Each structure stands twice: as C-alpha cells, then as structure tokens.
Image: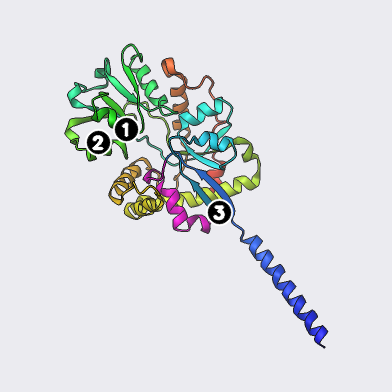
Amino acid sequence: MKKMKLKGLLRSACAAMIVASITTTAYAMDKVTLQLKWVPQAQFAGYYVAKEKGFYKDHGVDVTIKPGGTDISPVQVIAGHSADVIVDWMPDALAARESGVPLVNIAQIYNRSGMMLTCKKSSGIKTPSDLKGKTLGVWYGGNEYPFFNWMAKLHLTPGKDIHILKQGFNVDPLLNGQADCISAMNYNEYWQLIDAGMKKDQLISFPYEDEGVSTLEDGLYVLSPNLKNPAFVAKMAKFLAGTFEGWNYAVKHPKEAAKIVVAQDMSGAATLRVQTRQMENVAKLITYANTDKMGYLEPDAYHRTIKMLLNSGQQTVIKKDPGDSAMTHVVWELAMKK
C-alpha cells in the first residue's frame, strides 16, 4: 500500500511538473533588446513608460533598454548583434545601409523633426540668407546630413561661404561666442540656452521642418535578414504594440513620464522640471500619438528624406535610391492587430 501511495504521489508530482512546464512555456516572454540613440531622457520616454507600466509584459515581451552615449553607435551595436532593434535617425540609418548594414525601418515614432539652427539675434541674422559668412555649429555622427542638404539648397558652400564648427552635444559655442548659430533640438538644447540665462527674444531659430529640409528622426530599425524569420516578426510586432502604448501614455501624462525617465538616469543629472518640459516638446513631434496611425511611416516622408540625402551638394549622404527596401509596414500592421 505504501509503495502504491508513493507511486501515486510521484505520478501526481510528475503531472504537476509537466503542467507547470507547459504553462511556463505558453507564457514565456519573448526577449527583446532595444538600443537607444542617447542617454536616458524624455526623447525616449515612451520606451521607459512601456516597460515601467507593464505594457511590454502585457504583450508578451521582456524588453531590455540599453542607453546610448557619446561613444555608443546604435548601428554598430545592432551590426554586432547586441540588439534586436535600435532607435536611429533615417539619414544615419540609410547611410549605414549603403555601407553594408542592412537596416530596415519598421516604425516611425517621430513624424516631425525637432532639429533647428538657433542663432543669436545680435549676430545680425534675421533670415537664412544672413547665414553667409557666419560660423555655424554642426553635429556630426550622422546628424549633419540635414544641415548640409539645407546649405546646398541655400547655395552656401562650407569652408567658402560659411565656417563650420564641429559642435559637441552642448550649447557652449553659442554661449561662449565661438559660433553665431548652433544645432539644437526643440526639446533639448534650445531650452539649455534659456536655462543658461538667455532670453527668448535674444534668439532666433530656423526649424528644419519650416525650411523644407527636415528628415525623419527617431525611428525603429532592425536588420533585414531577421525579417525573414516569422518568429522575429511576431516578436517585433509585440514590441511595437507595447511601444505604441508607452508613447501614447507618455504624451497624455508628461509629468508621470518624466518621473519614470528621471528614475532611469543613474548619473543624477536629469531633473523632473527639465524632463517634463522636454516631454511636452517631444509630444509636438509625435502628432500621430493616440491615433490609429501611431508609429506609421508615411511613404511620402520616407521618399522625401531619400531625395534630400541624394542631393546634399558636396556632402551627398547616399549614392543610390534604396527604393522601398529600407522600410516595411508588415510589422506595424501586425502590431496594430495586437
């Protein structure tokens, strides 16, 4: 009798283990690694919100978010297979693609550009035509492409008509008088100037969007070969579904989103006031938030960006038109069904 009871208990235990194993497998989370373009800030709030609020978990994905930095290239990270998906600007992504890294855009979070050239009014600049003869701060590392496209449109040759100052990711050149204008984002550097004591009426800004030279910024990119794997596509669709929820929430709740971002900044440099303001300005660039087109890459905007990159004067970014090969709506469409 004891042996029979023991066998029964063992059978019950084995059955329980099998059920547990099946249950665990059925609810196993797909792991996704996301590489950001810069350090934790509201520019990436939607991803941090999606993780913190459990939106990723709700869609069955366990997401690791890797912050960027001055010495981190998202393209190199994904090329080395240390990330599944990256945040990048389209000019940089297309240039990398032509150089051999087969990046494909699967979603476009920002559908407006936040980049602009901000100048001191005291330098005598009132219109873009006044830039001739001036010293202009320019970001490199892939961020210079829209600028050179604009200069080509204005028929201003770097080194001849304008002087280029390679700008770090700060506003010091304008504050110290080293440059007449600097590159700035509507949600970041512009406000650093204000926080440094400059008045709004002392500055004049030329948004790239208004000048007709904007290119697509924060988009999500994966490696083309991975899209041949149905399991990868399904995993990325879950990731996008959670990401869209995160961004929709962040746009509606900027202060809460800012708190989540500040908690992710291990340096302690981020403040709630600054990140809330940044989130409010980031929201202006995500005009599809809380609509059925959230994250949708507009084909016209995609081809407009390509056209600009093919015609950037002396600084031509790409030599060949990739056609539709550098974008796909397949993952986005699947995500919208989630």
Q: Is residue 101 above or below residue 12?
A: above
Q: Position of residue 334 (x, y in %)?
A: 56, 47
Color encoding of the figure: rainbow
**Of the residues tagged 2 and 1, which is closer to the observer?**
2
Label number found at residue 310: none
Label number found at residue 61: 3
**Tag 2: residue type?**
Leu
All told, the count of numbered labels is 3
| Label 2 neighbour load within 10 Å: few <14, some 14-19, many 20+ | many
Task: For the N terminus, give its image quadrant.
Answer: bottom right
Q: Kindly report the secondary structure that dominates the magenta region of the rendered protein.
A: helix
Q: Are marks 2 and 3 in contact (CB under 8 Å)?
A: no
Circle 2 SS class: helix
Pointer 3 or 1: first along the chain: 3
**Of the residues tagged 2 and 3, which is closer to the observer?**
2
Residue 336 visible (yes or no): no
Out of 317 and 3, give the one closest to the viewer: 3
Q: Position of residue 234 (x, y in %)?
A: 60, 48
- Which residue is disc 1 drawn over? 184
Distance between mark 2 and mark 1 Cα atoms: 10 Å
**Tag 1: residue type?**
Ala
Circle 3 SS class: strand
Distance between mark 2 and mark 3 Cα atoms: 39 Å
Q: Are marks 3 and 1 in contact (CB under 8 Å)?
A: no
- Which residue is disc 2 drawn over? 193
Pointer 2 or 3: first along the chain: 3
**Tag 3: residue type?**
Val
**The residue stretch that appears in magenta:** 39-62
Q: Are marks 2 and 1 in contact (CB under 8 Å)?
A: yes
| Label 3 neighbour load within 10 Å: few <14, some 14-19, many 20+ | many
